[in-house]
Amino acid sequence: MYTHHTYRTGAGAYARVGIESQAASASPHQLIVMLFDGAKTAIGMARHHMASGEVQAKGNAIAKAINIVDNGLRASLDAQAAGAQGASLVANLGALYVYIVQRLLQANLRNDVAALDEADGLLENIASAWREIGDERAPNINL
């Protein structure tokens, strides 16, 4: 007999396999888009858990968003590949990612919805610009 927990666990495993399959065949540009999507999803979950007073779940969701921004998006920046002209853009983008992580930390510590919304909005601005670049025009990415 299947319980609600069994269904959720199975559905989660199925979703992970789908994402892993998608990631395995994705271009570096598409992987960055997936990171932005993952961060947005995690922030949305954090917002939901914050509103529901689910402290641990909120913290886990924010930690996931921070991990994606810091160890995924920021870590993929490559100043050497960007060359002299792109180095300042890479530095500015890196600083923006650090700021986003700080806002996410503040959102977690203070249950600050405004900080969560600000981080989400900043990520969406970067993500929409990244999506417009397109796969064929994307810069070299260090993944």
Image (cartoon, rainbow, N blue to C red):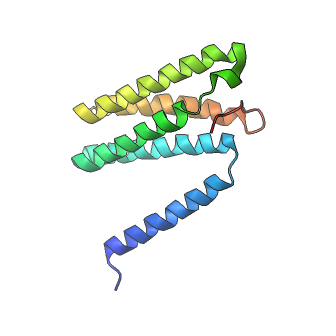
Toward the right, the furthest residue is 136
**Residue 66's quadrant in the figure?**
top left
At a point 60% along the width and 33% down the height, the residue shown is 128
Residue 96, relative to residue 61: is it above or below?
Answer: above
- Residue 114 visible from this viewpoint: no
The quarter of the rendered structure image containing the C terminus is top right
Quadrant that contains the N terminus? bottom left
| The one of 82 and 102 positioned closer to us in this rendering | 82
Q: Is residue 28 visible?
A: yes
Which one is in front, 65 or 76? 76
Against 104, residue 59 (above or below) is: below
Rendering coords of residue 106 (x, y %): 29, 29
In percent of the image, x 60 and y 21: which residue is there?
90
| Residue at (43, 71) in percent of width and height | 10
Residue 86 in the image, given as x and y percentages of width and height: 68, 17
Choose between 126 and 10: the one closer to the eye: 10
Residue 56 in picture, x, y percent from top left? 24, 48
Query: Is 39 on the left-hand or right-hand side of 28?
Result: left
- Left or right, 44 with respect to 92, comes to left
Q: Position of residue 57 (x, y in %)?
A: 29, 50
Q: How many marks?
A: 0
Task: Please tell me which residue is depicted at 38% across the width and 68% down the height of the picture.
Answer: 8
Residue with the most extreme bottom position: 1
User: Relative to 7, does residue 35 appear above or below in the rendering?
Assistant: above
